[in-house]
Amino acid sequence: MKRQTRPADIYLRFLQLAEAIRGLPSLPSLDPLEERILALVARAGKEQQRLCVRDMMAKEELGSPATVHNRLKSMREKGWIMLTDTEDSRRKQIELTQAALLHFDKLSKCLVEAAKGS
């Protein structure tokens, strides 16, 4: 008799697959705050919204401006994000790097694979 698949099984399979790709050589890992920042940058990019450093530093839920600034600097050094110029040279827009986009592509494949296995 075949075991019935629960919706949670799909998510757990996704987590298992996602963990496996984290073991592959790629970008350096992120701490939990950097993960949150990455998600904000990714969502803003997907929604075609501009997100500048000043906007990110103003988000109180991420911590002090100095903390956010340090995390953004770390994420740039790790290759997850880049800063691009805007019409105002004093403002820098935060965008995902090509390597970060490829990482999201891999995670998407994991999600599709997990859903197929149900």
Image (cartoon, grey):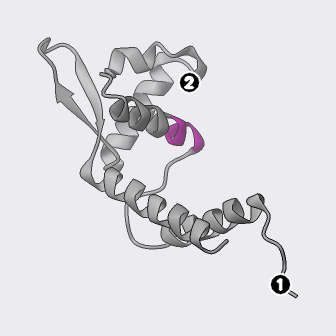
* Kind of residue sitting beneath label 2: Leu
Q: CA distance from mark 1 to mark 2?
A: 46 Å
On screen, 51 above or below 43?
above
Residue 116 is situated, as x and y percent measured from the top left of the image, at 58, 71
Image coordinates of residue 9 in percent, x first then y, are: 74, 65
Residue 45's disc is: none
Question: In the image, 22: left or right of 106?
Answer: right
Q: Amino acid at mark 1?
A: Lys
Q: Is residue 108 magenta?
A: no
The image position of residue 20, as x and y in percent, is 55, 73
Residue that label 1 marks: 2
Q: Which residues are magenta?
A: 32-36
Q: Residues within 10 Å of mark 2 (few under 14, many from 20)?
A: some
Report whether 49 appears left or right of 85.
right
Q: First in sequence: mark 1 or mark 2? A: 1
Give the residue pinned by disc 2.
62
Q: What is the residue that sits farthest to the front in this orientation?
A: 1
User: For residue 48, what is the image quadrant?
Assistant: top left
